[in-house]
Amino acid sequence: MTDRVVVAGAVFDEGRLLAARRSAPPELAGRWELPGGKLEPGETAEQALVRELREELGVEAEPGERIPGEWPLAPGYVLQVWTVRIVSGEPRPLEDHDELRWLFRHELDTVDWLDQDRPAVAEAACRLPVG
Ligand code: CDP
């Protein structure tokens, strides 16, 4: 059986990456992730990402390039990550998160990322200005 895809966004703005702190479920609460969620049937990854970022953050987003790689989550799920630009709106933690932070490259290890997000965050870091 093919794995179900969870798509997440490496959201960039002004040389920073957006980090979101999960508020649920209890075993993930307090850990930081790239915001996103599961593909619904019939959706492309880009469509799912736009929908998830609208629901979770209240922004209109434009996916850019896929960050190479695919990372295992719970059995049956894999994580894919796209770069994202915000087209309109200011991100707010509306759903699934209780705090958001914009991080410069040198600040990326100041939050406790979910283990499965770390390789994607490292890839995203390569796309941030040094400093
Ligand atoms: O919002 P939806 O229910 O579609 O998805 P979610 O609960 O946000 O994410 C589905 C699963 O993917 C959860 O187990 C998350 O922990 C995981 N996930 C992740 O590991 N890394 C991310 N950047 C986003 C989600």
Image (cartoon, helix red, strand yellow):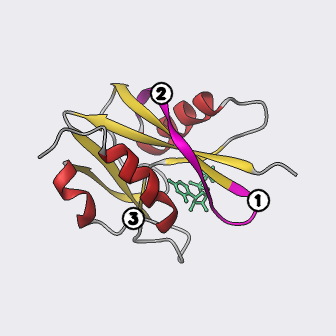
Q: Is residue 76 above or below residue 105?
A: below
For label 3, the residue is 113
Left or right? Give the position of 16 relative to 100. left
For label 2, the residue is 63
Left or right? Give the position of 70 relative to 124. right
Identify the secondary structure beneath mark 1. loop
Q: Position of residue 61 (x, y in %)?
A: 43, 28
Q: Position of residue 108 (x, y in %)?
A: 26, 57
Outermost residue on the right side: it is: 1
Q: Earlier in the sequence, mark 2 or mark 1?
A: 2
Q: Three-letter amino acid code at disc 1?
A: Gly
Q: What whole-number distance in Å separates the C-alpha atoms at marks 1 and 3?
A: 21 Å
Task: Give residue 76's mark.
Answer: 1
Q: Is residue 50 above or below residue 106?
A: above
Instruction: Give the residue displayed 41% in from the left and 69% down from the top.
Output: 31
Which of the 4 image quadrants contains residue 15?
top left
Q: Which region of the structure is painted magenta?
A: 59-77
